[in-house]
Structures are given as C-alpha cells and as structure tokens.
Amino acid sequence: MQRVTGIGGIFFKAKDALALRAWYKCHLGIDVQEWGGAAFIWADADGKPTGGTTIWSVGATESDQFAPSEAPFMINYRVEDLHALVKLLREEGCDVLDKIDESDFGKFAWLMDPEGNKVELWQPPAGQ
C-alpha cells in the first residue's frame, strides 16, 4: 500500500495573521482568500489541471487547531486509503489520535510524530 501521495496543505500560525496574509499577497502574489489561505491547483507542465490542490493557510497564534502539538505549523499529507493507513500506523505503535473526520471535503485523521508535531492525513473525495 502506498502511504503518502503528496502534500495536501501547509498550515502555520502567525502573531498577526491578517498582516502576514497581506504580506504574502502583496510580495509573493499568493491569492489569499477571506478564509485565510489559498488553494494551489495542481497542473501539468502545460498548465492543464491534474485534479489536485494544495492548501496554504495562515492562522492566529491563539488557535488550538494544532493541539495537542505546541508547534506553530501542521502539514497535511494526501493518502489513498485513510482507514487502512491509520490501522497500519496503530499496529506500528504510532501515536494516532482517536478522532477521524469524514465530510464532503474528504476523510481526515491525525497523529503525533516523535518530536510532538501534529500530522494531518487526508484522503480527498473521489475524483480529486
């Protein structure tokens, strides 16, 4: 079974999230949306969309989105079979959090790496 197939998103905290989002928009041209981030659509060498996105998002320092991690970031990894991978990671002794979310956005699970960083696993909905 293939485990990680790509990066689904990069999330990080900022002391002044609004100002940092504006800086990235102004200086790096990132199309920051009102929800606090941008979606980079995957494309081939000719610019044709290939059916995936990577999310980039800046959140407030006070957010508990990354809890129980103390780190100011979290990386979301795309996977093909979330439930099978979670089962395997538990069997391997990984610190997999109990919660699994399933919604229109796909399936999500979380684990803690050995350094205490929260890792998000995401199985996109079919066709993405």
Image (cartoon, rainbow, N blue to C red):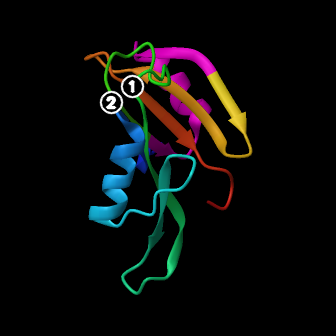
State whether residue 3 appears in this view. no
Q: Secondary structure at mark 2?
A: loop
Q: How many marks?
A: 2
* Disc number for residue 61: 1
Circle 2 residue: 15
Counting residues from the start of the chain, the first of labels 2 and 1 encountered is 2
- Mark 2 vs mark 1, CA separation in Å: 5 Å
Q: Position of residue 82 (x, y in %)?
A: 58, 36
The three-letter amino acid code for the residue at tag 2 is Lys
| Number of residues whose C-alpha sits closer than 10 Å to that of mark 2, classed few (under 14), some (14–19) or many (20 or more) | few
Position of the C terminus, as image quadrant, is bottom right
- Asked if the magenta segment contains residue 93, the reply would be yes
- In depth, the one of 102 and 40 nearer the eye is 40
Quick one: SS at disc 1? loop
Magenta highlight range: 77-99
Q: Is residue 3 above or below residue 97?
A: below
Instruction: Using the image as rendered, state which of residue 56 and residue 49 is in the foreground.
Output: 56
